[in-house]
Amino acid sequence: MTDYTVEFVGTGEEITVSDKQTILKRCLEEGIAQEYSCRVGMCLACSAEIVEGEVAQPAARGLTEEEREDYALTCMARPLSDLKIDRGKYPPSIEDDTTSDASAEPAAADD
Ligand code: FES
């Protein structure tokens, strides 16, 4: 097990996360206000932009392959190096979700 430092851009917060733990789990343990919802890599609520460093997140199904380079889903992501991340930054594909949600609205009733 290797411990890495995870620094949150703009807040001055810093935590230690092992390569066996998710960033979100450690945030919750340390009282850091990281947003989340599904905790299974689908909703993108826990997204953060990777400013520096690398993560392993094979189960981050809500991200495209390209987005996995620049964004971490903290509920799934485990550090592979020291990290700097910017919480609350969302990948471009979240816009697609908004579009598909709008098209999924039920049609008006006929009567
Ligand atoms: S909490 Fe939903 S993707 Fe992480």
Image: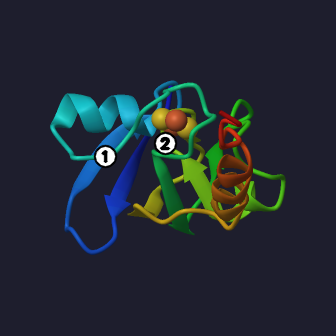
Mark 2 vs ligand 1: CB below 8 Å: yes
Check disc 2: other Cα within 10 Å, few if <14, some if 14-19, many if 20+: many
Q: Which residue was labeled with disc 1?
A: 34
- Residue 99, position in %: x, y? 70, 59
Q: Position of residue 8 (x, y in %)?
A: 32, 62
Quadrant in which the C terminus is drawn: top right
Which residue: 66% across, 36% down?
Answer: 109
Q: Earlier in the sequence, mark 1 or mark 2?
A: 1
Taking depth in this image into account, of 104 and 70 the one nearest to the observer is 104
Q: Quadrant of residue 91?
A: bottom right
- Pick out the residue farthest to the front: 111
Q: Nearer the viewer, residue 80 or 31?
A: 31
Instruction: Say which of 1 and 9 sits in front.
Output: 9
Distance, label 1 to label 2, CA atoms, is 8 Å
Which residue bears the numbered disc 2?
74
How far across and how far down the image is residue 82, in percent? 47, 55
The answer to whether residue 77 of the structure is visible from this angle is no
Q: Amino acid at mark 2?
A: Thr
Is 36 in front, or is 81?
36
The reply to whether residue 81 is in sight is yes
Determine whether label 1 and label 2 are within 8 Å by CB. Answer: yes
Q: Residue at x 18, y 36 (%)?
A: 30
Furthest toward the right, the residue is 65
Residue in view at x 40 percent, y 61 percent:
88
